[in-house]
Amino acid sequence: MIWVVPLLVLLYFTLTRRWRSKNEPPLDQGLIPWLGHALEFAKDVPKFITRMKLKHGDIFTVRVAGHYVTLLLDPHSYDAVIGDPTSLDFSRYAQVLMRRIFSLELPLEQPAKAKTMMKTHFLGKSLSALNSTMSRHLEALLKTEMPQNQRSWKEEGLFNLSYGLIFKAGYLTLFAGERNNNGPGASEVYQEYKAFDSLLCKLARGMLKAEEKKTAQSAQRRLWELLAPAGLTGDSGSSSWLHAYRRLLQEDGVDEESQRKAVLMQLWASQGNVGPAAFWLLGYLLTNPDALLAVREEFGKLEKSGSPLLDRAVNTPVFDSVLEEILRLTAAPFITREVVQEKILCMADGQEYLLRKGDRVCLFPFISPQMDPEVYREPQRFKHDRFLNEDGSAKRDFYKGGKQLKYPTMPWGAGANGCVGKPFAISTIRKFVYLLLTNYDLELCDPNAQMPEINASRYGFGMLQPEGDLPIRYRPRDTQL
Ligand code: HEM
């Protein structure tokens, strides 16, 4: 009988393993049955992927918690994934995340319809209106935080200041409306959202401990309550986008409870990345005086010329280069697609690989091109003028293997499922930074402070967040720039 146990173990390993067939990418399943590389993957994504890249090259398949994920790391080949939404589907994996993070089930075709509708609200003329409402809320909230007649310094964490103000202004612009301006509503939603957001990555990976699960569920329930009236009626004060979104959900037969969950998901999509991006931008400026000076000079000229700084028509190449650079350093989304029909993936170097139906394909542009030393010299370093040519124009030509890259960075995704909110997000960050630098004295509490470490659990989920915060102090300026 003594041989039964080893035999069963052997049988288990044999049955749960998969065998690589001809033409498939290198396969690395890890030693632990079913889990595969899940633990190492969740602990430090870039470290794990870099290790696998050194072992297997620019394409390989790993087993992660029962799923087979093919990672593609050659930026010259990204179009083969982004450009084939028929075989490589966006919505199925999005539905998995919706279920795990928001306990939400929507009809499969619903998000695509919602996105088409969203474009009409976040681009063109509607965008200008949104930008000016957002701008008004940002100014009002900043004045509440720090009245113009105050003379003493106020100390705060820069992450909390940036995330909090942008989140609240965004919430008032899109979800709650003018009537609630400066009321307790926005602050309460922010506090609950922060509790939820701090557990979001663990929720997505299904790795919450019992106590954390309770916290996440309680924040979620409170947010559903707080968001219940948002967009429900035309006069709820919410943006026309949210009202149209609610109507679309109703037309698609989505019940009231799921509508609230869907509104929370939209709160996350629209607010979860912008504040953190503004934090990294301001933080890198404050810890790099030459960069701060260059941006101040550019804003100073705008200030003198009386330009309103609300739309892209205003030229801010120095600010744009700083934004591009901080997104290169701190935007780390996974671009994930599900293989819904078998596909031959043709790499830029001519190699062909078979992708199996049911697997996932994942791009991680953070590793390459964004942190690739072949593309960017000293990729770990912040260089505010990295995306500027010598004549001051925007630089977009970057090379790998002697060939120009189509996507030198990819913070917003690309192709049919690229970010709809990109122009709104850029305008918001620019306005926020402009307001702070033109109307306030802003400095580090410790002049020698360095940028905080990155919270390693957030790789794969959009903008990174810091571990801890960067203490700053600010007060209204006597004179403008
Ligand atoms: C710094 C801020 C932001 C960053 C870095 C960011 C990043 C991204 C990325 C990487 C994707 C693509 C995901 C993929 O292809 O798998 C995406 C999609 C999306 N983003 Fe953003 N985003 C930001 C702000 C916003 C804002 C402000 C909104 C809304 C107002 C928004 C709405 C969306 C939506 C709806 C999608 C899904 C597109 C689809 O269904 O195909 N994002 N975003």
Image: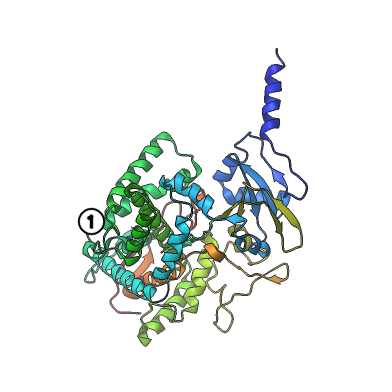
| Vertical comparison of 208 with 359: above or below | above
Q: Secondary structure at mark 1?
A: helix
Q: Residue 57: x percent and y percent?
A: 72, 53
From the top left corner, tell me how far across and down residue 435 is, in percent: 34, 72
Looking at the rendered image, the quarter that the N terminus falls into is top right
Q: What residue is shown at x 48% (from left), y 39% (from top)?
A: 207
In screen coordinates, is 254 left or right of 316? left
Please state which of residues 162 and 32 is positioned toward the viewer in this rendering.
32
Q: Quadrant of residue 299?
A: bottom left
Residue on which the image places disc 1: 184
Residue 19 picture location, percent across and down: 73, 40
Please give the name of the residue rendered at 41% of the width and 77% of the height, measured from the top-left corner.
311
Q: Is mark 1 within 8 Å of ligand 1?
A: no
| Tag 1: amino acid | Pro
- In screen coordinates, is 320 left or right of 304? right
The correct choice, above or below, for 391 with respect to 59 in the image is: below
Q: Position of residue 293 (x, y in %)?
A: 45, 76
In the rendered image, the vertical position of residue 480 relative to residue 379, given as above or below: below
